[in-house]
Image: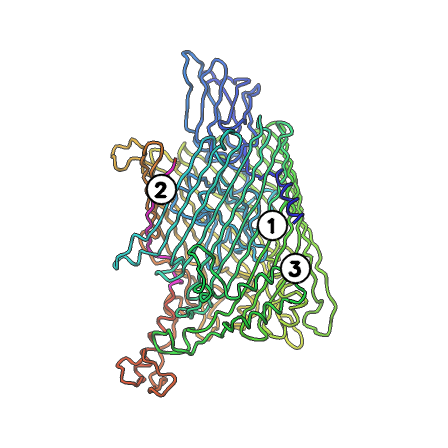
Amino acid sequence: MKKILTLLFAGLFLFAAEYGKITGKVADSETGDALIGANVMVEGTELGSASDVAGEYVVLYVPAGTYAVVASYLGYDPYTFTNVVVNSDQTTILNFRLRPTVIQVEGVTSIAVREPIVISATQTGRSVTSQDINRLPVTTINQVISLQAGVVQSNLGTHLRGGRANEITYFVDGIVTKVPQTGGQSAQINPGAVEEVTVVSGGFDAEYGDALSGIINVVTREGGTKPSGSVSWLTDEMFVTDNMDGLNFGYNLYELSFGGPIPLSNRFRYFLSGELMMTKAYVDAYYKVPSPRMDYKGNARFSYLFPNAKGKVTLSGFNSREQWVQWGNAAGNGVSLKYFAAVPMVRQKNWIGSSTFNYMITAQTLTSLKIGMTHFDQVFGNRDYAYEDTTDRQWFQDFRIKGEHLIQYLDNISDNPDLSPRNIIIDSLQNYHEEFTDRDVQALRNNPYGVEALFYTYGDYRVWRYTTNNDIQARFDLTHSIGKLHEFKTGLDYTQYDMFYADNTLPWVNNPFWDYYNRQPFKLAGFLQDKMDFEGLIARLGLRIDYFDPKAMTYTNPGDFLDSNTTQATSSYKISPRVGFSLPVTERMKFRFNYGHYFQLPALDDMYGITDTSVVRVALTRGNTIIGNILIKPQKTVQYEFGLENQFTNDIIFGFTTYFKDIYDLSQTREVPALPTPYFQMFNVDYGNIKGFEFRLDKLMSSMWSVGITYTLQFAKGTAAYAGEWYDDHYYYQIEPPVIDYWLDFDERNTLNANLDLDLPKDFAFIPLQNVSSSFVFSYHSGQPYTPKNLKGEKLGDDNSARKPSFWNVDFNASKGIALGPVNLRINALIQNLFNTKQVLAVYETSGDPVNHGDPEPQLDAFTVLTLSSTRYSPQGDYNHDGVMSRVEEKEAYMAALKDFYDNPRNYYGPFKVQLGAGISF
């Protein structure tokens, strides 16, 4: 506790890398002569600069956001640009042309056109602002991310430029939000709290590490100079009639936010945001399936601005709880759990705490320190309905997992020497109210067809799992600018993990598959980079070094039960060079190139899973066991990228990027010969090769409409799509490791995203459409690959040699604003899958069809006559109710059940959905 309080106090001097800069020239509008000493100020802040002898100015360290910027000069009319967007780590260019004053006027105001081509950017990145998010037909930040070039969704997760789902690193206000055990995303910030989300898919600077595919940086909103707020509600529960029941998913989304200056001081500012989402059917499937979910999220940010723009202190906090119940194919076997009452639940909680301080030592030098803490915990298993029914549980409270009370023992196991992990995870769990019973595929209860061996109908799901991580992150940065030419930056990063994992996948047996570990590794990194802005060349040169200490030990020879020698994990370090160039040809055209080495730790469960000496020898007695490898190395990507961007007119921008990357030392399982039983272990043996082409064409908002088109052509090959793929192939199909690389499961060859936005003004001629904005988002996805197999599981061709069907989709959002005195009323409609197209996510490898498995129809003589005395008799299958199930009736019931079993709605993305909403803002 003392350590945490010390870090919180130190965190008052912390800064998040969320600023950019504004630069340009101030000149006489008639003669073009430079105006020396003109003042350029960012309204609402104390940031500003004066033009030099060439009329040039630079405003450094501007927090990401949208501003008004004014230039003034004695004897000239002041000029103001509004809606100036400043992106983190980028340069915004504003050129002022001031008119000599003849008659006293108030000045000139103009809406700034957001620079479509960022000359200073050497990498591929797209920033989406809060205004963009409000217009798009989305309700989550992850939906915004999925619309960006190079992003592919599969049943494995989100992939960026052909990488695995855990190769992306997520930042929130400079804090890494990632589950180290799995490499997955931990915090999903509510959109109402987001000022900007940036997706960088290639060429990210040396200050960013531990990522192979790219980084996603979320900057949260900050209070402005005036009080503001909003409240909104989005729902589909207005569709309650019988013929509209398919449109009612029980969906409700409540959002609210408030911000502004704290009374008595404009230097103190705050922003508060929260959302509550509830639905009865969250699973994305072809039709509505029962899968309740209830999430809440809240974000707070408080800041204090020092006089004379010398610095800023910020305190930020985020808290979320997400919980849902699975459905259908959670067992990974068709929809075998379709009529199973005890489908598993997931509950995960996440919080982030950070405080920031940055201070400008001089006008050119910024020093900063960053401290942040994150927490993530997740439980997975059977929901304890019996307990919830016997308590006065409120609708907003947590779902409860069976064996919930055992978690507190695990959290405090070091305080109780009488308890061991085995006592809790195996013995106590098995005896918990004697509730854990094996799933029954024979019982006919809850089965509408009266046939056996297809559906699980009784018992408990087989997994009980508890995962948690608490980490402390610290960073010191020093940035120094030399005029407009150089911006040096150096820094140190430190992260201390405290990871815990407990798992039992057969809680009703004495010797289950189980695992337990508690590890406290740490990593340290340092970087040095220089951003050079010359007249005809912008260069970013960087070098990063990463150090990781696993802090672990295990048996030297796990499979030799007579060998008690142990091995200590070794630390590792990696050096990553980064080079990027931007060559402006004209003010509207540039070439860019970047090259870099990128390293990332594997999912740490690949390192620590079943390596604790209290677990590994017991686990190996079961066979088919995968153990981690504490000697596994970081994974590596080498990437080249070349791009061209050109602004044809004031409204139309074109760009393309081509990239090539090799990925080495990816984690994968291999069999280890041992006596008495061989086992499986993780090694750095997988490889990937990705190359692609991205095309972009934008028509900026003008004449009340805009269009954006992105197209990605990508070739993603490798030796495996995820870390446990070879084990699955070996266990289920006895397939050996591939000798050559093949198209990866998420190799989506062609992806096209396009949006059409309409923004009608308040004085539009047709009065009902005044102040209406809308957005259509069209997407096309070519089919991802699969391996054709016969009914015996034998491959009928090369790995992933066949393709799933392609599909397309259109989402739509429209809103209308109505001014009511000091507040604005807004009503909106959000439609997903506007044309109700069938969008295939998965197919059966035996047929290539999402519904038909290809099983042959059994012969009639394969069935027997069942009388009332038979334990297999079922009234559901006795269609004429004569007390006898004939062969014809039994076959008919079996065929109906077989069709239902393979008719998996999760093989498709969701159908047509409509949600209506309203809100007020001020």
Query: Could you say which disc has been placed on residue 367 in the image?
Result: none
The vertical placement of 488 against 662, above or below, is: above
Between disc 1 and disc 3, whose residue precedes?
1
Which residues lie in the magenta part?
Answer: 905-921
The answer to whether one can see residue 588 in this image is: no
Number of the front mark, 2 or 1: 2
**What whole-number distance in Å separates the C-alpha atoms at marks 2 and 1?**
40 Å
- Using residue 693 as the reference point, say whether residue 669 is left or right of it: right
Crowding around mark 2 (Cα neighbors within 10 Å: few <14, some 14 to 19, many 20+) is some
Q: How is the image coloured?
A: rainbow
| Quarter of the C terminus within the rendering | top left
Between disc 2 and disc 1, whose residue precedes?
1
The answer to whether one can see residue 46 in this image is: yes
x, y percentage for residue 787?
A: 47, 66
Residue beneath the point at 54% across and 51% down = 168
Q: Secondary structure at mark 1?
A: loop
Q: Secondary structure at mark 2?
A: strand
Hey, what amino acid is under mark 2? Gly
Query: Could you say which disc has been placed on residue 632 in the image?
Result: 3
Q: Secondary structure at mark 3?
A: loop
Hey, what amino acid is under mark 1? Asp
The vertical placement of 94 against 159, above or below, is: above
Q: Of 443 and 483, which appears nearest the observer?
A: 443
Crowding around mark 3 (Cα neighbors within 10 Å: few <14, some 14 to 19, many 20+) is many
**Residue under circle 1?**
210
Residue beneath the point at 49% across and 43% down = 197
Query: Could you say which disc has been placed on residue 919 in the image?
Result: 2
Q: Of 130 and 697, which appears nearest the observer?
A: 130
- Quadrant of the image occupied by residue 582: top right
Hey, what amino acid is under mark 3? Ile
